[in-house]
Image (tube, grey):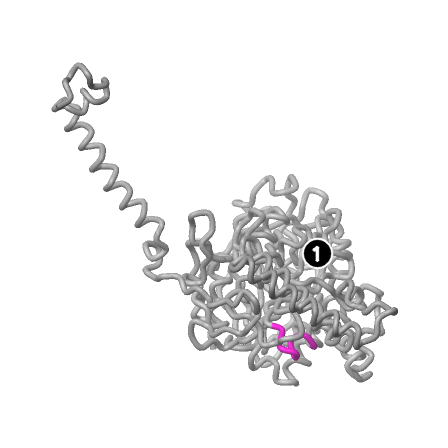
């Protein structure tokens, strides 16, 4: 038996009745706290639902996988317009802007994102009723307006930020910070792709370059690297796909076959290495693209009537190049690419209406320039896809990071950023046609009727693809991460 004088001070404390009771209380409290924290970390504690993990073969990450439930859309084409088109000058008709033109009604802020505000300004282009629905759209985008009976307008979107980089991040990945997976990465992670010789997710960048957030708009974040978007456009095909002139097709095939065997042996030594598997898969896809991409990129195979409809031979060079991108986007969808993200605008150095829709000054001229590039080719692409029956299985999304103010800036010629109200459009598989959901207030200043968060918008797109946004998650750094974070509700009223 150990004598008390031989015990350490800590040992004697444990034999003390008061110390024993105190330590026991702390221990029991710690156990209770651990149980509560464990419950908070369970995603079911938020939504009542457990995650659905896609069964991904590391050797074949693009193999098509089943959705959570039957979805209307198998593919998605996102037309993203960096810089923020003015909703009150395009699709959100507000007669009060004409009524109060030149005035400053009470309740309007004195300062917004870029400084002092000016007066209310009526739309710079006339609005007219379109189609059987009589939807009022502006003359800025007459070709898009002519498709109003095919569109589902959402007029009550609002977002968390008024800065372009964070706005692009938030709209495309669900977070204002960088490093989170984009929508296309989430969709291809969940569903894979039906197309075996082209990427599952393609980002077609504007002829002028990348948007402000760059590759984060189509990045994989913390998802396996295989699910990032592959970026190229009609002018700049994927790099390094041409066979070296010193090699014959037979030599090239033998080299690829040998490399495939060596890669397989290497992967056997490192099972479960997602980065290695993704790298090997990307090289194998590149080998397949050597034969598939040249034909895909050869737009000369398209009939003259298609080139005329899209406008590849008229207007500015930027418009002609964007029109070619639109043809490429349609061809990728035809081939079964799961997600195509088509950018209309870039932002390498601020833009201000020249490289994108960010019109802080001279909005009448700068918006007109962007519309000349975007309107005809985009409308032609949608009509063409409809003719070919592609809209039966494809969802089209026209969107941007936020809207613009109903009043002018202090300079009197531009509209500032508006995160509190903007318009986006859905069309095609699973959504109502000739339908408008939600409303901004009488000035288009704030979402007023049925406000829609970006989380709701993304939840709805995932739902149309047969994916439950509350169950599509990825465990990262101790958290179950989702495109919609811990928010989002499907906008059921827009579903056909």
Q: Farthest residue toward the front?
A: 1
Secondary structure of residue under mark 1: loop
Q: Is residue 218 left or right of residue 36?
A: right
* Residue 94 in view: no
Q: Position of residue 363 (x, y in %)?
A: 73, 54
Range of residues picked out in magenta: 331-337
Dot 1, crowdedness within 10 Å: few (<14), some or many (≥20)? Answer: many
Q: Relative to the observer, which residue lies in front, 158 or 361? A: 158
Q: Relative to the observer, which residue lies in front, 156 or 31? A: 31
Q: Residue at x 61, y 75 (%)?
A: 148
Q: Position of residue 400 (x, y in %)?
A: 62, 59
Q: Residue at x 56, y 59 (%)?
A: 269
Q: Residue at x 82, y 79 (%)?
A: 300
Res. 25 image quadrant: top left
Verify whether residue 345 appears in magenta. Answer: no
Verify whether residue 332 appears in magenta. Answer: yes
Residue at mark 1 = 357
Q: Residue at x 20, y 37 (%)?
A: 28
Q: Position of residue 168 (x, y in %)?
A: 61, 53
Res. 374 image quadrant: bottom right
Q: Farthest residue toward the right?
A: 246
Q: Relative to the observer, which residue lies in front, 268 or 55? A: 268
Q: Relative to the observer, which residue lies in front, 301 or 454? A: 301
């Amino acid at each position: 038996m150990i004598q008390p004088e031989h015990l350490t001070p800590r040992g004697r404390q444990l034999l003390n009745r008061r110390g024993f009771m105190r330590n026991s209380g702390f221990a029991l409290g710690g156990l209770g706290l651990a149980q509560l924290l464990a419950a908070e970390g369970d995603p079911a504690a938020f939504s009542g639902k457990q995650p659905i993990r896609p069964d991904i073969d590391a050797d074949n990450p693009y193999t098509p996988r089943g959705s959570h439930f039957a979805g209307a859309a198998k593919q998605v084409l996102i037309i993203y317009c960096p810089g923020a088109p003015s909703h009150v000058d395009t699709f959100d008709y507000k007669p009060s802007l004409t009524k109060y033109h030149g005035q400053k009604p009470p309740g309007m802020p004195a300062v917004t994102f870029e400084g002092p505000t000016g007066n209310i300004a009526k739309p710079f282009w006339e609005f007219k009723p379109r189609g059987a629905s009589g939807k009022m759209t502006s003359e800025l985008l007459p070709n898009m307006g002519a498709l109003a009976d095919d569109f589902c307008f959402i007029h009550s979107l609002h977002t968390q930020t008024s800065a372009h980089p964070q706005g692009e991040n938030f709209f495309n990945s669900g977070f204002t910070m960088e490093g989170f997976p984009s929508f296309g990465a989430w969709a291809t992670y969940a569903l894979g792709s039906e197309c075996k010789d082209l990427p599952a997710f393609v980002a077609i960048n504007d002829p002028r370059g990348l948007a402000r957030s760059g590759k984060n708009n189509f990045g994989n974040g913390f998802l396996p690297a295989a699910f990032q978007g592959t970026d190229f456009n009609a002018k700049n095909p994927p790099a390094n796909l041409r066979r070296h002139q010193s090699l014959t097709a037979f030599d090239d095939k033998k080299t690829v076959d040998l490399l495939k065997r060596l890669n397989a042996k290497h992967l056997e030594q490192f099972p479960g290495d997602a980065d290695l598997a993704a790298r090997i898969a990307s090289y194998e896809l590149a080998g397949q693209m050597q034969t598939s991409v040249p034909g895909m990129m050869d737009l000369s195979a398209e009939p003259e009537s298609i080139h005329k409809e899209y406008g590849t031979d008229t207007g500015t060079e930027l418009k002609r190049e964007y029109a070619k991108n639109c043809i490429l986007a349609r061809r990728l969808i035809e081939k079964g690419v799961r997600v195509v993200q088509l950018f209309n605008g870039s932002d390498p150095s601020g833009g201000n209406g020249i490289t994108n829709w960010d019109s802080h000054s001279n909005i009448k001229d700068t918006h007109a320039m962007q519309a000349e590039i975007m309107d005809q080719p985009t409308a032609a692409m949608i009509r063409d896809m409809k003719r070919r029956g592609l809209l039966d299985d494809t969802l089209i999304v026209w969107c941007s990071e936020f809207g613009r103010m109903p009043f002018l800036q202090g300079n009197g010629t531009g509209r500032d950023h508006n995160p509190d109200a903007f318009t986006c459009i859905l069309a095609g598989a699973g959504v109502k046609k000739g339908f408008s959901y939600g409303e901004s207030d009488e000035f288009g200043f704030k979402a007023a009727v049925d406000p829609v968060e970006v989380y709701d918008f993304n939840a709805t797109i995932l739902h149309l693809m047969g994916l439950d946004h509350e169950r599509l998650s990825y465990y990262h750094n101790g958290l179950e991460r989702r495109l919609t974070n811990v928010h989002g509700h499907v906008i059921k009223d827009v579903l056909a």
